[in-house]
Image (spheres, rainbow, N blue to C red):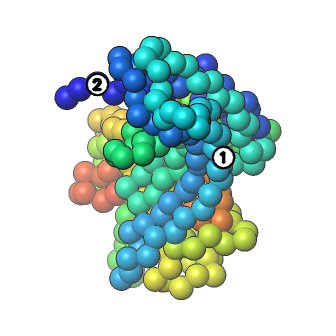
Amino acid sequence: MTPSPISIVFQNYSHPYYPGDTVLGVVRLKNPEPLDAKSVMIQWKGASKAWGFPFSDLKGKEKHLDGEEVVWKAGEKTQLLPIGFHEFPFKFMLPQVCPPSFHSPDGSTIYKVKVEIDRALKSNMRMEKEFLVTRKLSYKEAEGYGKEDTLVGACMRRPTWMFKKELVFLRIWLPKKNFYPGQETFFEFTVTNDSNTPVKEIYISLNQSCHYHATALRSPCLKLNSSSCPLNHRHKSYKTHQIGKESRMKVMVAPWTKKSFEVPFKFKEGYMAPNFATGLMTMGHFLKFGFVAENGFRGSRTVTVFMEYL
């Protein structure tokens, strides 16, 4: 495959941009022979899309960024771009409010720069390149949880006239609630087994919940629970999936005993969008903590966390 003579270079491509940032870059064109062309246009686009709604082929869309500039135009007598190496710089500012870059099986938010060379009698030449946008966590999102924040209580046996109620409690210590991709940490588990069945395993997983709309609303759904959404079931969806691998630890907590453990956990490497809410979609991350009893019984609970880029 012949490499494209067009390349797009961002000045700060190694790190994501933030809302309100100025994006600088240059389009480079290596032209070994005169090119029949009318103009060279650079565009910057940003949009969210949602799809995969039940019983419907609807697709929602919401624009966040839309601009263009003609950086070269042919003269009146000739429509030839001369031989040589050409550079066309570009500069634009991101909106003060825009959602972070996001990719999932049912929706996305993509920001990109596009180049199009308009050719009179031939197919236009095009090239595009995506760039990442993130956001900073608010003070409230970055606050720590503190010790013994969450408690998982699961009933192993319902009370009857012969047996009393049996419970397993799982208490977790979260030192904070904001994490970054690739971070390695430990979570403290305290298992109180008030039942006749031993607990054999405890685990942690990072998950992502997404709520999508088939049409953008004026106000976002701040809660991930789609039951609070005003749209009907054909125009909304709620999806959740695990990110990365679970961290599991084999344990033995005998009946009517209590033990504490430190479970290591590593967050998946690579960019992850921080939690956000727009008129088209709402996305959040949560950690799932759980246990498995010897008889196969499982109990779990989720805690909202926030991913940030460092």
Q: Is residue 55 above or below residue 167?
A: below
Q: Amino acid at mark 2?
A: Pro
Tag of residue 3: 2
Farthest residue to the left: give it: 1
Q: Is residue 207 above or below residue 240?
A: above
Of labels 1 and 2, earlier in sequence is: 2
The residue singled out by tag 1 in the image is 67
Secondary element at image label 1: strand
Residue 165: x %, y % from top left: 44, 69
Residue at figure coordinates x 63%, y 81% from the top left: 230
Residue at figure coordinates x 48%, y 35% from the top left: 79
Q: Amino acid at mark 1?
A: Gly
Seen from the viewer's position, the closer of residues 286 and 13 is 13
Secondary element at image label 2: loop
Quarter holding residue 24: top right
Residue 142: x %, y % from top left: 72, 37
Quarter holding residue 282: bottom right
Farthest residue to the top: give it: 84
Seen from the viewer's position, the closer of residues 219 and 81 is 81
Q: Is residue 17 left or right of residue 56?
A: right
- Mark 1 and mark 2: span between their CA atoms? 27 Å
Residue at figure coordinates x 30%, y 59% from the top left: 297
Residue 284: x %, y % from top left: 57, 52
Seen from the viewer's position, the closer of residues 180 and 163 is 180
Judge whether residue 171 can be spotted in this image.
Answer: no
Residue at figure coordinates x 38%, y 69% from the top left: 52
